[in-house]
Image (tube, rainbow, N blue to C red):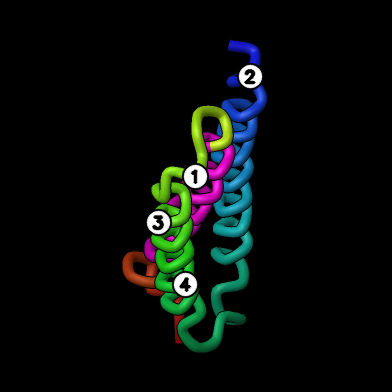
Amino acid sequence: MEEWRIPLTILIVVIISTSGFWLLFYKWLIRNREKIHGRPFEYLFFLLLFFAGYWTTWISSGAFKGPQFVTRFSLVVACIISSLFAGYFHYIKEMHS
């Protein structure tokens, strides 16, 4: 169980820090909505989904076992959380010009 403590801690820290970053960024966006030009969140949404798919393929190759898998999976989780926020900003909140 000792070998799982660090990877699970990394996963939890990644989830909390990624969500915290996007929530703080959302507060900034609400105050500075007029400064956003173009469609940055649409591009960011698809870019992050691409990275999540790439890393999912990479960790699914079977090269990583156990704790190593969880550490690599945290990259996928960070990309998925970020793409959900970017998609929310673009498609639901319509933060673009």
Of badges 3 and 1, nearer the viewer stands 1
Residue wearing tag 2: 3
Above or below: residue 37 compared with residue 78: below
In the rendered structure, which segment of residues is drawn in magenta?
69-89
Residue wearing tag 4: 47
Whether residues under marks 3 and 2 lie with C-beta atoms below 8 angstroms apart, the answer is no
Element under disc 4: helix
Residue 25: name its quadrant: bottom right
Residue in the image at 51% along x and 79% along y: 40
- Cα gap from disc 3 to disc 4, whole angstroms: 15 Å
Q: Which is more N-terminal, label 1 or label 3?
A: 3
Question: Counting other residues with Cα less than 10 Å from the Cα at mark 4, is it few (<14), some (14-19), or many (20 or more)?
Answer: some
Q: Position of residue 29 (x, y in %)?
A: 57, 66
Left-right relation of 55 to 71: left
- Cα gap from disc 3 to disc 1, whole angstroms: 11 Å
Q: Which is more N-terminal, label 4 or label 1?
A: 4
**Residue 63 image label:** 1
Residue situated in front as seen by the camera: 32 or 64: 64
Element under disc 1: loop
Q: Which is more N-terminal, label 2 or label 3?
A: 2
Q: As shown in the figure, which amino acid type bears the numbered disc 1?
A: Ala
Residue 89 visible: no
Q: Position of residue 7 (x, y in %)?
A: 61, 29
Residue situated in front as seen by the camera: 14 or 68: 68
